[in-house]
């Protein structure tokens, strides 16, 4: 099957899983088909799926990521000792682990085609990621606490692992608790990376955006926490600060000494 045939197979399979989708028409336009498929991935609850579906899904998603263009950590330049700054799509980054700014349910964003990093990571990793996260939450018997982290496979992403951390939510002014919780997110991710003998980890901008943490203060906490951890532990871990927006790139570039 080519990419179009795989996409249509996946759409038809996911539509057939739920009777309420019986009246959904599959668009002929490629972009609209991709949007429908992503929406179906996003709203699907954790559940088993047959091996043929997974085979087709994996081939499809890996090719879609290849077409977007994969960036390898080996091709990045350090901005400081053991620290990189890279602007781009974190789901195209080949490294040991990328960090997902997760919600407390840990199973991803269920809003169709929402532009948060949680949604994008779960979309392009495949439905196995939601299933694994559901197993983690079920086993621990409660939602993930703010500032903590869990590691999973990355499935169809170029990275080997995804480290999920629940960022603090700011309502109004930033409190000392907010700052401690954000620092804990970074520390938890760094520690779990070292516990799993990883060589490198890529951080997104945790708690900014819809979680309301001011971008500049969030970046200061991120950079200071990573520098302190690298200085005061025996870690050899390399860190990539991944940003998507230009404003965040300028903030990190200033903090990391490029002005």
Image: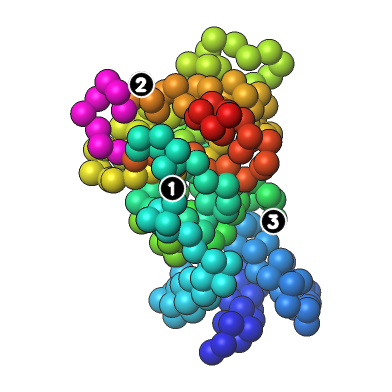
Q: Label 2: how many residues lie within 10 Å, few (<14), some (14-19) or many (20+)?
A: few
Residue plotted at (60% across, 62% down): 41
Residue 11 location, quadrant: bottom right
Q: CA distance from mark 3 to mark 1?
A: 32 Å
Badge 1 element: loop
* Image coordinates for residue 81, horizontal then vertical, percent: 35, 35
Q: Residues within 10 Å of mark 1 (few under 14, many from 20)?
A: few
Residue at 50% x, 41% y is: 85
The residue located at (43%, 77%) in the rendering is 55
Q: Position of residue 227 (x, y in %)?
A: 38, 25
Which percent across, then down, holds residue 151? Answer: 36, 44
The residue that disc 2 covers is: 228
Name the mark on residue 155.
none
Q: Which residues are magenta?
A: 230-237
Quarter of the image with the N terminus is bottom right
Viewer-closest of 165 and 242: 242
Q: Nearer the viewer, residue 75 or 137?
A: 75
**What residue is at 48 percent from the left and 16 percent from the top?**
180
For label 3, the residue is: 113
Q: Earlier in the sequence, mark 3 or mark 1?
A: 1
Classify the position of the C terminus by image quarter: top right
Disc 2 to disc 3, C-alpha distance = 37 Å
The earlier-in-sequence mark between 2 and 1 is 1
Q: Secondary structure at mark 2?
A: helix
Magenta highlight: main SS: loop
Label of residue 77 in the image: 1
């Amino acid at each position: 099957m080519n990419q179009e045939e795989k996409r249509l197979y996946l759409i038809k399979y996911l539509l057939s899983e739920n009777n309420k989708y019986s009246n959904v028409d599959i668009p002929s336009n490629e972009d609209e088909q991709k949007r429908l498929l992503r929406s179906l991935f996003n709203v699907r609850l954790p559940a088993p799926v047959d091996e043929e579906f997974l085979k087709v899904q994996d081939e499809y998603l890996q090719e879609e990521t290849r077409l977007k263009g994969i960036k390898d950590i080996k091709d990045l330049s350090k901005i400081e000792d053991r620290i990189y700054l890279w602007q781009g799509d974190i789901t195209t980054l080949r490294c040991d682990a990328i960090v997902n700014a997760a919600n407390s349910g840990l199973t991803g964003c269920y809003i169709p085609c929402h532009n948060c990093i949680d949604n994008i990571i779960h979309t392009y990793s495949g439905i196995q990621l939601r299933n694994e996260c559901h197993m983690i939450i079920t086993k621990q018997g409660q939602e993930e606490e703010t500032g903590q982290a869990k590691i999973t496979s990355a499935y169809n992403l170029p990275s080997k692992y995804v480290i999920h951390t629940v960022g603090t939510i700011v309502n109004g002014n930033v409190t000392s608790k907010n700052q401690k919780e954000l620092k804990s997110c970074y520390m938890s991710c760094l520690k779990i990376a070292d516990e799993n003998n990883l060589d490198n980890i890529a951080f997104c901008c945790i708690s900014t955006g819809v979680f309301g943490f001011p971008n500049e203060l969030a970046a200061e906490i991120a950079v200071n926490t990573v520098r302190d951890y690298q200085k005061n532990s025996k870690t050899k871990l390399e860190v990539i600060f991944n940003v998507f927006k230009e404003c965040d790139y300028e903030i990190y570039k200033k903090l990391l000494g490029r002005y």
